[in-house]
Image: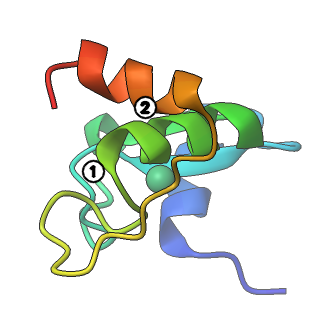
Amino acid sequence: MSEPEYRKIAGKYHDLTDKLVHHIDGDRSNNHPGNLVVMDRKEHYHIHGTMGGWKGNNSKKPRLSIKTLDDLLIIYNNGF
Ligand SMILES: [Zn+2]
């Protein structure tokens, strides 16, 4: 079973059971511990919805994850 490098790195600091590792700057090749944050699936979904997609802010075709009016309001409240 091969784990991505970023999970190995984050796993040194956190218990990753049922957790996902998010790259704060959206760059999956930036595996500096300070760029990695551990969160559960729900939180991860939420943060990507707020960012507007799954590939960070540099994506040319962001996949919007807006499912509810609340999601939209959160994005608006964050200044988007
Ligand atoms: Zn993420």
Q: Percent x, y for residue 4?
A: 58, 75
The residue to which callout 1 is attached is 32
Q: Dot 2: what SS?
A: helix
The residue to which callout 2 is attached is 72
In depth, the one of 54 and 74 nearer the eye is: 74
In terms of image quadrants, where is residue 19? top right
Three-letter code for the amino acid on which mark 2 is drawn: Leu
Tag in front: 2 or 1: 2
Say which label, 2 or 1, has the lower sequence index.
1
Q: Percent x, y for residue 40?
A: 73, 35
- Mark 2: few, some, or many residues within 10 Å (few <14, many ≥20)? some
State how far apart marks 2 and 1 are (Cα). Answer: 31 Å
Three-letter code for the amino acid on which mark 1 is drawn: His
**Is residue 27 visible to the viewer in this orientation of the structure?**
yes
Write the residue at 26% across / 80% down.
61
Whether the residue carrying mark 2 lies under 8 Å from ligand 1 is answered with no
Q: Is residue 44 above or below residue 5?
A: above
